[in-house]
C-alpha cells in the first residue's frame, strides 16, 4: 500500500491529516503537480485520471478521491471516529464535510488553478489537461471563498467544531482550505473571532502539522 500525494496541495493533505489523527503510518511518495509529474506515463499507469491523492492498494488497484480514501481507512480503523458513529451523525458529518468542500475548498482551488502561472494551460486537475486559465473564475473563486469565511465564522458561534462537539473530517477539510488560503495571502479577518478560535484550536492538534 502506498499513498501518492503532494505536500502543499490541500486534497492530499486532507488524507495525511486523517491518517495522522488515526495514527496510521503508510509509505508515501511525493508527486510534483506543478511540474506535471502526475501526467507522466508512469503515474498514469497507476491512476489514469492523473489526480492526487491516489492510494495504491496491495493488489495494484487504486482509490483516487480524498474522502473515499478516508472512508476506506475509517472502515479499517474506526477509532478515533472521524466520520460518524451512527446513521444520524454520519449523515450530519457528511453534510458538513460537503459544505466545507463546496463552499470553501473548491472556490479557493478554482481561484488558485486559474491564477497560478504554472497552471495557465491546465487549470483543471488531471486529464484531459488542456484547459486554459480564466481570470474571471479566479476572481469569482475568491469572492465565493470570502463569503464562505463569513458563514463559517457564524457557524462556529454555537459549536466547538464544524459538525458539533467533536472533531471530524469536516474540520480537516475546513482546516486545509483555510490554511491553504493563508498561503494565498487570504487571512481570516480579525473580527471573525469564532473562526479564529477554531483555527487556533485545530492548529494545535498533532495531526495538522503534517
Image (spheres, grey):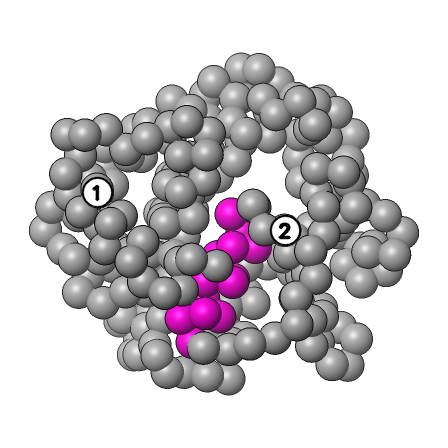
Judging from the image, what secondary structure is the residue with disc 1 in?
helix
Q: Position of residue 15 (x, y in %)?
A: 52, 62
What numbered label is drawn on residue 64?
Answer: none
Q: Earlier in the sequence, mark 2 or mark 1?
A: 2
**In the figure, is residue 184 to the left or right of 117?**
left
Count up the numbered dots: 2
In the image shown, does 22 or 130 lie closer to the viewer?
Answer: 22
Circle 2 sits on which residue? Answer: 6
Front-lying residue, 84 or 173: 173
| Labelled disc at residue 195 | 1
Q: Residue at x 76, y 73 (%)?
A: 61
In the image, taking residue 204 as reference, residue 138 lies left or right, namely right
- Residue 65, percent from left and from top: 59, 58
Q: CA distance from mark 2 to mark 1?
A: 27 Å
- State whether residue 12 is above or below residue 124: below
Span colored in magenta: 10-22
Residue 168 quadrant = bottom left
x 41%, y 27%: residue: 185
**Residue at (51, 47) in percent of width and height:** 10
Residue drawn at x 31%, y 53% is 203
Q: Is residue 17 magenta?
A: yes
Q: Is residue 152 left or right of residue 124?
A: left
The answer to if 124 sits in the magenta stretch is no
Q: Can residue 94 be seen in the rendering of this structure?
A: no
**For residue 48, above or below residue 182:** below
Residue 25 in the image: above or below residue 30: below
The image quarter in which residue 25 lies: bottom right
- Magenta stretch mostly in which secondary structure? helix
Name of the residue lying farthest toward the top: 136
Residue 202 or residue 57, whichever sits in front: 202
Helix, strand or loop at mark 2: loop
- Residue 124, horizontal then vertical, whole percent: 66, 35
Amino acid at each position: 500500500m502506498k499513498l501518492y500525494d503532494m505536500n502543499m496541495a490541500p486534497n492530499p493533505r486532507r488524507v495525511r491529516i486523517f491518517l495522522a489523527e488515526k495514527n496510521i503510518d503508510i509509505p508515501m511518495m511525493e508527486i510534483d503537480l506543478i511540474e506535471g509529474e502526475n501526467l507522466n506515463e508512469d503515474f498514469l499507469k497507476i491512476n489514469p485520471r492523473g489526480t492526487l491523492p491516489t492510494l495504491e492498494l496491495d493488489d495494484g488497484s487504486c482509490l483516487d478521491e480524498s474522502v473515499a480514501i478516508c472512508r476506506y481507512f475509517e472502515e479499517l480503523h474506526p477509532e478515533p471516529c472521524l466520520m460518524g458513529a451512527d446513521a444520524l451523525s454520519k449523515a450530519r458529518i457528511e453534510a458538513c464535510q460537503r459544505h466545507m468542500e463546496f463552499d470553501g475548498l473548491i472556490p479557493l482551488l478554482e481561484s488558485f488553478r486559474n491564477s497560478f502561472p504554472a497552471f495557465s494551460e491546465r487549470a483543471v486537475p488531471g486529464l484531459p489537461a488542456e484547459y486554459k486559465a480564466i481570470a474571471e473564475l479566479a476572481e469569482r473563486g475568491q469572492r465565493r471563498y470570502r463569503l464562505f469565511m463569513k458563514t463559517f465564522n457564524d457557524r462556529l458561534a454555537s459549536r466547538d467544531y464544524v459538525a458539533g462537539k467533536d472533531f471530524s473530517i469536516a474540520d480537516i477539510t475546513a482546516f486545509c482550505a483555510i490554511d491553504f488560503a493563508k498561503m494565498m495571502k487570504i487571512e481570516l479577518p480579525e473580527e471573525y473571532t469564532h473562526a479564529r478560535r477554531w483555527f487556533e484550536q485545530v492548529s494545535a492538534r498533532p495531526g495538522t502539522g503534517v
